[in-house]
Amino acid sequence: MLKHRLIAVIIVRQGQVVQSVQFKHTNVIHYDAIHAVEAFNAWDIDELVLLNVSRKPESRDGFLQVVESASRYCFVPLAAGGWIGDDDYASRLLRSGADKLVLNTALADDPALVSRLSEKYGAQCIVASLDVKHDAAGKATVFVDRGRRDTGQPPAEWARRAESLGAGEIFFNSVDQDGARQGYDLASLKAVCGAVGVPVIAFGGVFTWQHLLEGIQAGADAVAAANIFHYTEHSTKKAKTYLLEHGVNVRRSGTLKTFQENAD
């Protein structure tokens, strides 16, 4: 049985780690992403995701430096995304130390790029980011371009499309739930998990460890959070301990030593 992964997301704007609330980023958490990377490494996180949410493409070179610096201190798989619009920048991110590429807008504007990158680096390297938002009538559709443009496509259909283009993993996020502290968008998450055969990462809205458990129960292979992990000492260890205590198969090395575990 495969273990479920716990993933910390580090949201970067203009080189600083910021808090995200419905895709608005005003509060700075760390002035240097290295501080967050060092903490999560010490707390035995399973994977890290670095996202460049800066509004301008001119931020790309600065973000490369963030990825390069982070990779020196990161001892787990590192995914990076934001403003990946061509082969060269994707290559530069990988050469800077990223293990996976997180693509969002390219799925709408340049699907051939997604397929080319998958063919060149392998599907395990391609993470399709789905930002889901509900309209006033409650209809859920996928947004791209930092949550600014509506594709009009339902999440499940968009996820199947991403898989067909060569994505090896789906990174599910909710614009509505982001920073709202109400847990994941479970209905949309379940629809996506049921639509694809590749692993799904749940993200957006976690405020309690119970929310992580609900993501696993909805079908996610991995659960991710950002804001909550930055503000609690040993947060990821506490989260994994909670999941283990509730029957979720996670890597035990990342749990608290006080947890009375049996031998594997």
Image: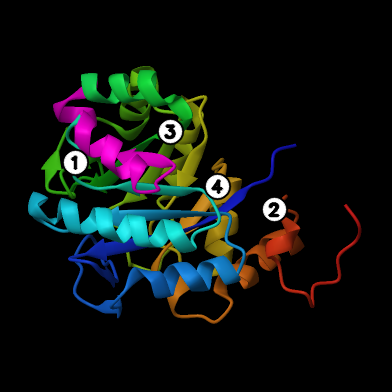
Q: Is residue 14 visible?
A: yes
Q: Does residue 237 belong to the magenta stretch?
A: no
Residue under label 1: 144
Q: Tag 4: residue type?
A: Ala
Do labels 1 and 4 touch, CB within 8 Å? Answer: no
Number of the label disc, if any, that sits on residue 250: 2
Label 2 and label 3: CA atoms lie apart by 22 Å
Tell us which disc is closer to us: 3 or 4: 3
Disc 3 or 1, which lies upstream in sequence? Answer: 3
Along the viewing direction, whichever of 12 and 76 lies nearer the viewer: 76
Name the residue located 26 percent from the left edge and 53 percent from the top edge: 64
Disc 1 or 4, which lies upstream in sequence? Answer: 1
Q: Secondary structure at mark 1?
A: strand
Label 3 and label 1: CA atoms lie apart by 20 Å
Disc 2 or 3, which lies upstream in sequence? Answer: 3
Tell us which disc is closer to us: 3 or 1: 3
Q: Does residue 107 belong to the magenta stretch?
A: yes
Query: Compared to 205, does 142 lie above or below?
Result: above
Mark 1, residues whose alpha carbon is within 10 Å: few (<14), some, or many (≥20)?
Answer: many
Mark 3, residues whose alpha carbon is within 10 Å: few (<14), some, or many (≥20)?
Answer: many
Q: Tag 2: residue type?
A: Val
Name the residue located 23 percent from the left edge and 24 percent from the top edge: 113
Do labels 3 and 1 touch, CB within 8 Å? Answer: no
Q: Tag 1: residue type?
A: Val
Q: Secondary structure at mark 2?
A: loop
Name the residue located 43 percent from the left edge and 56 percent from the top edge: 71
Measured from the top left, where is residue 246 in percent x and y? 73, 60
The magenta segment is 87-111
Residue under label 3: 125
Disc 2 or 1, which lies upstream in sequence? Answer: 1
Number of the label disc, if any, that sits on residue 222: 4
